[in-house]
Amino acid sequence: MTKLIYVLNGPNLNLLGRREPEIYGHETLADVEADCRATAGECGLSLRFFQSNREYELIDWIHEARADAEGIVINPAAFTHTSVAILDALKTFSGPIFEVHISNVHQREAFRHHSYVSLAATGVIAGFGVAGYAFAIRRLGQLLAVTKPPA
């Protein structure tokens, strides 16, 4: 039985590939999901992939993950800098949590330099484009001591 992880995406990430491609690149959210699924498969993990522009939906998925998942990868997008509610939900999750940002938030506006989510994160990956998701999934695989089943 494979271990389940959740990949959660916050507001405006549904516009990847069309919104500010000079910052976020040309890959779409569908491309990100396909890459995440492939990487999870390589690591012997299964995943649920979600995106919402609504804070409460992200919180509900975090609550759901408490019962179902071994780890969480989250790109909270703008909620990174504003949501104590997402932080509080993440603090109830007992497994590893990786915060991912496509851009290097530390090279951007000052308000983006603070993350509430980082207070609950096992690790933070920023500035590697959408490849950051794969980095996070691979690290989860290592932390969860998952090996790929034999072919």
Image (cartoon, rainbow, N blue to C red):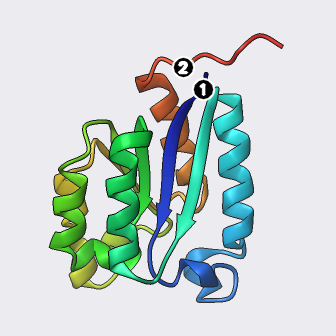
Horizontal arrangement in the rendering, residue 59 relative to residue 141 (left or right)? left
Q: Label for residue 35?
A: none
**Classed neighbour count for the residue bearing mark 2: other residues with Cα under 10 Å, few (<14), some (14–19), many (≥20):** some
Identify the residue under disc 2: 146
- In the foreground, 126 or 73: 73
Inspect the image, locate mark 1, and give the three-letter code of the amino acid beneath it.
Thr
Horizontal arrangement in the rendering, residue 5 relative to residue 19 (left or right)? left
Identify the residue under disc 1: 2
Inspect the image, locate mark 2, and give the three-letter code of the amino acid beneath it.
Val
Q: In which quarter of the image is the N terminus?
A: top right
- State the residue at coordinates (53%, 40%): 137
- In the foreground, 134 or 103: 134
Q: Which of marks 1 and 2 is nearer the N terminus?
A: 1
Where in the figure is residue 86, as x and y percent of width and height?
A: 25, 67
**What separation in Å lies between label 1 and label 2 (alpha carbons)?**
8 Å
Callout 1–callout 2 Cβ contact below 8 Å: yes
Which of the 4 image quarters holds residue 11? bottom left
- State the residue at coordinates (58%, 57%): 49
